[in-house]
Amino acid sequence: MTFKERLHDAFEEMMSYRKSVGYATATYRSSVPPFIDHCTNGHPDAVYITRDMVDEWLAFYPYSNNSKAAFISLLREYTRYLNFLGYEDFIPDDDYVVKRTAFHPYLFTDGEMCTLFTSIDSYVGSTCGRRYLPEAVLPVYTRMLYCCGLRPQEPPAIRIEDLDLDTGDLYIRQSKRHKDRHIIMSGDMLNLCRRYNAIAGKREWFFQKWDGTQYETSWYNQIWRRMVSMSGIAWRGKPRPYDLRHAFASRSIIRWIDSGRDVMELLPYLSAYMGAL
């Protein structure tokens, strides 16, 4: 068995185990295999993952501070698994502890939200002559993030059977802390999803590309930066897709205050809806 085969086989075994006990695997799959390929392509005669390989990858890949911390955490678990199997691959030690930087949410004004959605609704993307046009996906995808207070990684994971288009019940699978939850969409959001579903056709994922795979968060992040720029929003504070979730929460609280509701009584319901509990 080659070095590359051993690492990939062990990775798949680890993912199968995580899935069998109810843990998510998507973050591992987007982070660890590229590192494995970098190591095995650059060191085809190697036997184990070494400290030098980790240092090479960190110098090669343009991680942000928080992304680097997340990658090190995932790699540490993977190499611990390799050691559990009896190999001697390098496990990142305390020298690789990265202090995460706290993000401060960008607070959109009403005018900025209006121009942002105008830019999103007028977007025309590259289709390669295929079905499932990005311009049909983007307005629904973005409004689902905002109107349902979802995390950026949650819309791509929605399967067709997860959304009841009769009742508006949306099933969110194993998001943060691997918890499932059900939420109910507003009537307007549900009607938008019905119209989108009517043109998207038969598919596995609610947001599905022409090749049968789900849209990724990386696709949305690229378009997001373009849309923010087109809408004229100053890049101070670097608005992120996650800030739509903050906008949902803050505007919900403002509506309660304006209507004289007891905010402290309602906050647990908001937390449960957003999967924060």
Image: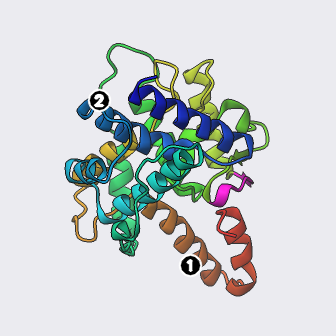
Estimate the x, y position of residue 47 in percent, counting from the top left: 37, 36
Horizontal side of 48 relative to 60 (left or right) equals right
Per the image, is 137 magenta?
no
- Looking at the image, which residue is at 56% across and 48% down? 81
Q: Residues within 10 Å of mark 2 (few under 14, many from 20)?
A: few
- Looking at the image, which residue is at 35% across and 41% down? 35
Residue that carries the numbered disc 1 in the rendered image:
254
Q: Tell me the amino acid under the disc marked 2.
A: Asp
The segment highlighted magenta reads 177-184
Residue that carries the numbered disc 2 in the rendered image:
45
Estimate the x, y position of residue 56 in percent, counting from the top left: 23, 49
Task: Point out the tag, 1 or 2, that comes first from the N-terminus.
Answer: 2
Estimate the x, y position of residue 108 in percent, counting from the top left: 38, 68
Q: Is residue 153 visible?
A: no
Is the residue under label 2 in contact with that under label 1 (CB below 8 Å)?
A: no
Q: Foreground residue, 110 or 8?
A: 8
